[in-house]
Image (spheres, helix red, strand yellow):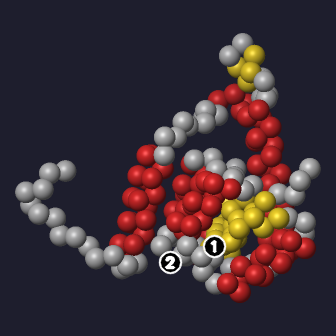
Amino acid sequence: MKPASVLIAMQQKESIQQIRQLLQNSGYRVAHSCQSGNEALQAVRSMAPDLLIVNETLPDFQGLDLAEIVIEDRLCAVILLASPAQKAFAEIKMNAAYFACLAKPVQGSVLETTVEMLLRTSRYFQQLEDFPVQDGKNHAGPENHRKEPRVDDGKAGDQRRHRLQRNSEEKHGHRKKHVRNSKSSD
């Protein structure tokens, strides 16, 4: 089995290097690293890594918003590195088998264990999705009722990405708020 590929999205180059070294020493392949959310989303879509490790804040995206897009579109598993307060919120919002959130600062052994566990879970669910369907039912167990993969023409993901990015920018003051004209239509 080939080593799992990981994509790292963080603002700080030093953090990227530390995580890269830790993962490579554990036998994982770091496919790419980037410092922006848009670049990370494009890389996840084009490279199809097994796992995305993302910081809670990127210059153009909130890590949780990026995680939401990646998980909803079933692109790969995600580990979000966040403050303790953000961790509690993220765990409530993102109740998904392909998602984990770790509070910063993260110990190397905790990150390694989480990567291993999340990749194992991801592979398990992938096997279930690949399980043969007979009589219109997947006989693998209680997973018979899971959602079918969405057919994505690219527009829904782009619209959601723009909406989340706009909300993130407005929240952090990176974008001027537009005053609506009372005659504009909704």
User: From the viewer's perspective, is the residue at label 2 or at label 1 nearer?
Assistant: 1
Residue farthest along the front direction in this orientation: 46
Element at label 1: strand
Tell me, yes or no, if residue 111 can be seen here: yes
x then y, percent, for residue 115? 80, 63
> What is the x, y in percent for residue 42?
57, 60
Q: Position of residue 44 (x, y in %)?
A: 63, 58
Residue at mark 2: 59
Dot 2 surroundings within 10 Å: few (below 14), some, or many (20 or more)? some
Residue at the disc numbered 1: 34
Rendered residue at 78%/24% (across/down) = 132
Task: Tell me how far mark 2 sits from mark 1, CA to CA.
Answer: 11 Å
Residue at 46% across / 57% down in the picture? 161
Image height check: is 133 above or below 85?
above
Residue drawn at (63%, 76%) of the image: 10
Q: Residue at x 80, y 37 (%)?
A: 127
- Residue extending farthest bottom: 14
